[in-house]
Image (cartoon, grey):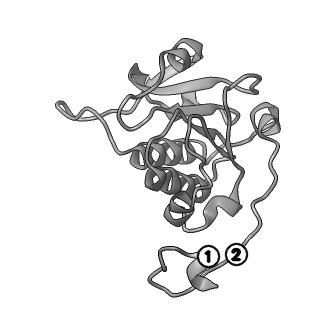
Amino acid sequence: MFAALAPRAPETGVLALARRPSIDARAVLAGPRVAPAIVLDDPAHFGNVGAVIRVAAAAGASAVITSGRHDPWDPAALRGSAGLHFALPVVRLESLSETNGPLIAIDPEGEPFRAAAVPGNALLVFGSERRGLSPAILERADHRLALPMRDNVSSLNLATAVAAVLYAWRLGNATR
C-alpha cells in the first residue's frame, strides 16, 4: 500500500493522507483581506511554489494564488511547503478577474519598494522564474514596486523575493 501511495518513498518513511480543502477561488480574490495575498504568475518549478507557500504561511499572507499550467497542490509543491498548504488558502486560477484591493506587481522596473505602499488588501504579484511577469499582468497592475538590489544583481529566487516583500510589509505594518 505504501509503495502504491508514494512512488518515491520519503526519507522519513512516514506518509500522511489528507483531504484537499475545497476553496472558492473567486471568493479568495474578491473577499476582504487584512494581509496581502500572493499571486504567482505562471510559476515553473513546484519546489519554488511550495517554498512560497511555506513563506506566505509563516509571514501571515492571506492566500497563495497561482496562474498557469501547474497545480499548486502537486506532491512536489506540498513537499516544498512542508504541508503548510493547509495553513492558508492555496488556489490556481485561469485569470484575475474580480479582485478586492490593488494589484501590485513586484517588478525590477517599478518604484522602490516601501512597505507603506502595500495595503493589507493588496494582491502582490510575482513573475515566473525565467520570464518574469506577463505583459497582461504588467498592464493590469495598479502599481509596480521593485526590491532594492546591488548593481549587477538582476533577480532573486522566487521564494526569496516573496519572503523579502512579505517580511518587509509585516515589519513595516507592525505598529498599525
**Amino acid under label 2?**
Leu
Q: Nearer the viewer, residue 29 or 6?
A: 6
- In front: label 2 or label 1: 1
Residue drawn at x 54%, y 12% as measured from the top left? 139
Asked where in the image residue 27 lies, by quadrant, the reply is top right
Q: Residue 156: where, in percent of width, then height?
A: 33, 41
Q: Residues within 10 Å of mark 1 (few under 14, many from 20)?
A: few
In which quadrant of the rendered image does the N terminus lie? bottom right
Picture coordinates of residue 42 (x, y %)? Answer: 51, 34
Quadrant of the image containing the C terminus:
top right
Question: Would you say 24 lies left or right of 65 here?
Answer: right
What's the CA distance linking mark 2 and mark 1? 9 Å
Q: Are marks 2 and 1 in contact (CB under 8 Å)?
A: yes
N-terminal of the pair, mark 2 or mark 1, is 1
Find the residue positioned furthest to the bottom. Answer: 13
Indicate left or right for 159 with 156 as reference: right
Most foreground residue, 20 or 166: 20
Residue 69: % across, % down: 56, 38
Residue 17 numbered mark, or none: 2
Q: Quadrant of residue 124?
A: top right
Identify whether 45 is placed above or below 84: above
Q: Is residue 146 above or below residue 142?
A: below
Label 1 SS: helix
